[in-house]
Amino acid sequence: MQCFTKAACEGHAEAQRNLAIMFKNGQGVAQNDVEAVRWLEKAAKQGHPMAQRNLAIMLEAGRGK
């Protein structure tokens, strides 16, 4: 968790997406759709295609906003 958080805070899109998925699924952290969307947005803005896909799915389902 700490490795993903550090890398995500430093702007690494893959780490941001991984951290988002952890929040989305409650893996190692409390499940939190708002945090998941926040991290997915950061990765998606950098052009990460899976983050863009995951973000679209969550928003379409009404999760995290």
Image (cartoon, grey):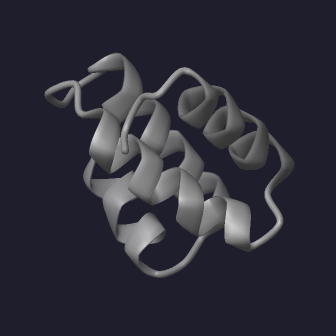
Residue at (54, 21) in percent of width and height = 61
Q: Given the current orientation, which residue lies at the most extreme left position? A: 30
Q: Is residue 60 left or right of residue 7?
A: right
How many numbered marks appear? 0
Question: If the image is split into quadrants, where does the C terminus sit?
Answer: top left
Q: Quadrant of residue 41?
A: bottom right
Residue at (45, 66) in percent of width and height = 8
Q: Nearer the viewer, residue 11 or 35?
A: 35
Q: Quadrant of residue 31?
A: top left
Q: Nearer the viewer, residue 1 or 33?
A: 33
List x then y, in percent, for residue 13: 65, 64
List x then y, in percent, for residue 15: 54, 55
Q: Given the current orientation, which residue lies at the most extreme bottom position? A: 10
Residue at (35, 69) in percent of width and height = 6
Q: Is residue 53 left or right of residue 62?
A: right
List x then y, in percent, for residue 3: 36, 56
Question: If the image is split into quadrants, where does the N terminus sit?
Answer: top left
List x then y, in percent, for residue 53: 77, 37
Residue at (27, 20) in percent of width and height = 26
Q: Is residue 16 left or right of residue 47?
A: left
37 lies above or below 48: above
22 lies above or below 18: above
